């Protein structure tokens, strides 16, 4: 097993449960996401099947922040006040695999609770900007995560709090001329894809 699975604070007594796919089992646990004051590009690494469990009001309801979701041409904002809830925008579901900016009013942390999706997971990326994250909550390089954008694509990672992107260009087939990016559990990033492709990764728990 990859030692980094749920490396950000999975419950020590995590329980194994049957998944819907016959080839995998899910791990139930939690992950703590640390946010810096300002813009943070993050994801929800766990799938919470409770009612509204993945909604941004559930995940970020305890802090003052704005959640910025890419809509294809710009960002749509959901504004949240701690203890009050959403004061502007929609209460959308932040499911594993999606990357969003969280503009936090102060340094803060949130805890996500739910299933770690394992087995074979796939997501379709379009030509252009894709704000994404690993569906499977493991850390590692692009190669470790099975991410192989086509030739001419660029992956952008964000420096939380301080701001600014770091660009990683690829020639396709897992070739990164200046080094490949690495990702933490719960980290969002941008794939500027030269063409559509499917990101597939298989991870099994024995």
Image: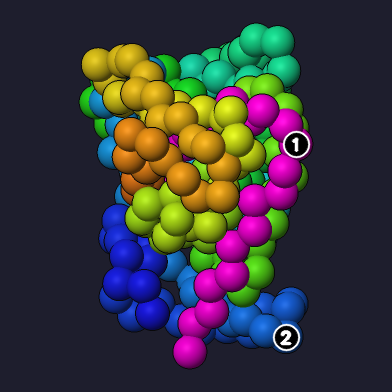
Position of residue 83 measured from the top left corner of the image (x, y, whole percent): 44, 28
Q: Say above or below: 172 vs 121.
A: above
Per the image, the residue denoted by label 2 is 22
Q: Which residue is drawn at 46% across and 45% down?
A: 175
Q: Which residue is drawn at 67% across and 84% down?
A: 23
The label on residue 196 is: 1
Q: Residues within 10 Å of mark 1 (few under 14, many from 20)?
A: few
Query: Regarding mark 1 in the picture, which secondary structure is present there?
Result: loop
29 lies left or right of 122: left
Instruction: Measure the alpha-carbon separation of dots 1 and 2.
Output: 29 Å
* Magenta stretch encompasses residue 200: yes
Query: Which comes sooner in the sequence, label 1 or label 2?
Result: 2
Count of all numbered marks drawn on residues in the image: 2
Please say whether residue 154 is visible from this viewpoint: yes
Q: Which residue is drawn at 66% across and 28% down?
A: 194
Q: Residue at x 53, y 22 (%)?
A: 67
The segment highlighted magenta reads 185-206
């Amino acid at each position: 097993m990859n030692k980094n699975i749920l490396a950000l604070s999975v419950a020590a007594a995590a329980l194994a449960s049957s998944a819907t796919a016959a080839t995998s089992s899910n791990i139930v646990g939690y992950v703590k996401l640390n946010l810096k004051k300002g813009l943070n590009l993050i994801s929800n690494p766990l799938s919470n099947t409770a009612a509204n469990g993945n909604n941004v009001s559930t995940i970020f309801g305890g802090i003052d922040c704005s959640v910025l979701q890419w809509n294809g041409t710009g960002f749509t904002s959901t504004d949240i006040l701690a203890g009050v809830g959403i004061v502007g925008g929609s209460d959308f579901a932040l499911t594993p695999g999606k990357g969003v900016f969280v503009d936090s009013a102060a340094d803060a942390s949130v805890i996500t609770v739910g299933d770690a999706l394992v087995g074979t997971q796939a997501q379709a990326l379009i030509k252009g900007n894709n704000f994404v994250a690993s569906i499977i909550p493991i850390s590692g390089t692009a190669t470790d995560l099975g991410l192989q954008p086509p030739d001419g694509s660029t992956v952008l990672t964000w420096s939380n709090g301080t701001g600014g992107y770091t660009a990683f260009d690829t020639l396709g087939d897992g070739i990164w001329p200046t080094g490949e990016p690495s990702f933490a559990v719960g980290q969002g990033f941008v794939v500027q894809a030269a063409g559509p492709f499917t990101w597939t990764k298989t991870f099994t728990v024995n």
